[in-house]
Amino acid sequence: MAGIFVDGWESAMESLGRKMKVVILAGGKGTRISEESRLRPKPMVEIGDKPILWHIMKRYAFFGLREFVVCCGYKGHMIKEYFVNYYQQNSQIQLCLDRDGVQVMEKSSEPWKVTLVDTGLNTKTAGRILRAREYIGDAPFFLTYGDGLADVDIQKLLCFHRRQGRAATISVMQPQGRFGALMLEEGSGRVLGFREKARADQAWVNIGFMVMEPEVYPYLGAGEDMLEGLPFEQLASDGQMAAYRHKGFWHPMDNVHDREYLGGLWDSGAAPWEKGVP
C-alpha cells in the first residue's frame, strides 16, 4: 500500500507512536430491522455474502488500519463464532478423516487483529466504550457504528481531525431526503409545487466514522448515557467536537429495504464503499 497516500498520512500515523485501533459499536438489538435481528445481531446481517460488519472493517483496512475492537452485546456470541471460524471458512482445506487431521491447501484471509469484547446486553453506547477501554488503550482511536456504510476517506478524516486539535471529530453529511417537498401557499391549503427534496434542505447528521482522543473518556461519565446524548452535548458545549463534512456516499441499514438497496449495490459491482478496495 506504500505510495498510494498523499504526504502526511504516513507521518501522521507514525507520530501517534503506534497503529490506531478501530472501535466498532456492534451491541445494539436492531429493533427496526427485527426481521433479521431476531435471528442475528444487526452487524451480522449480510450484504452480498458478507456481514455488514466485514464491509465496514474492509473500508478501514484499505487505509492500513487492521486492528479492530468490536463492542459486542446482543447475540454477541454469533460475532465471536464468525471470527473464530473465519480462517477456515475462507480457506481451502483438506480433511484426513481417518487421522483427524486438517490441512490448509489455500488460504484467503485478511491480516486483521480483532478483539471481541462483551460489553453487555443493554449497555448504552457510552458504556460500551468504557467497558472496552482496557482493550482500546489510552491512545487516539477511530470509532464507528456497525450498521452503516460510507466511502469516507479515512486519510482525509484523520488529517482534518489533527488540524482541528479537538477531543472528538464526527463525520457528518446532509443525506438525500426520502420524501418530496411540498411548496404551500401561505394561509391556504393550495399546493404551489412539488419537488424532490434537495440535499441542501436536509439537516446535518452524524454518520459515524469518528476520531476520538483519550480526552473523551471523562465525558462518558459512568457510561449510563447514549454517546450521542449528554457526552456529545458536553463535548460540543466545551468546544471539543469538530465536524468533518462528507459529501460522498453514506447509507445506514435501518430496515429490510436498506439491506436490499445495499445488497443491490454490492451485487452490481458498483458499491461506493468498495471504491479503491482490492
Image: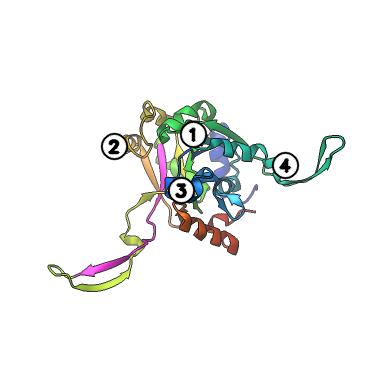
Using the numbered discs, state the Cα–Cα distance from disc 1 to disc 2 in whole angstroms.
21 Å
Quarter of the view holding residue 187: bottom left
Query: Residue at label 3?
Result: 34
- Give the label, 4 or 2, closer to the camera: 4
Amino acid at circle 3: Ser
Q: How is the image coloured?
A: rainbow
Label 4 – label 1 distance at C-alpha: 33 Å
Q: Amino acid at mark 4?
A: Gln
What residue is shown with label 2? 237
Please tell me whether mark 1 sits on a helix, a strand or a loop.
loop
Residue projecting furthest to the right:
98
Task: From the image, tell me which residue sits under label 1.
Answer: 140
Residue density around tag 3, few if under 14, some if 14–19, many if 20 or more, within 10 Å: some
Quadrant including the C terminus: bottom right
At mark 4, the secondary structure is helix
Q: Which mark is residue 88?
A: 4
Task: Choose the circle earlier in sequence order: 3 or 2.
Answer: 3
Q: In terms of depth relative to the viewer, which is nearer, 204 or 269?
A: 269
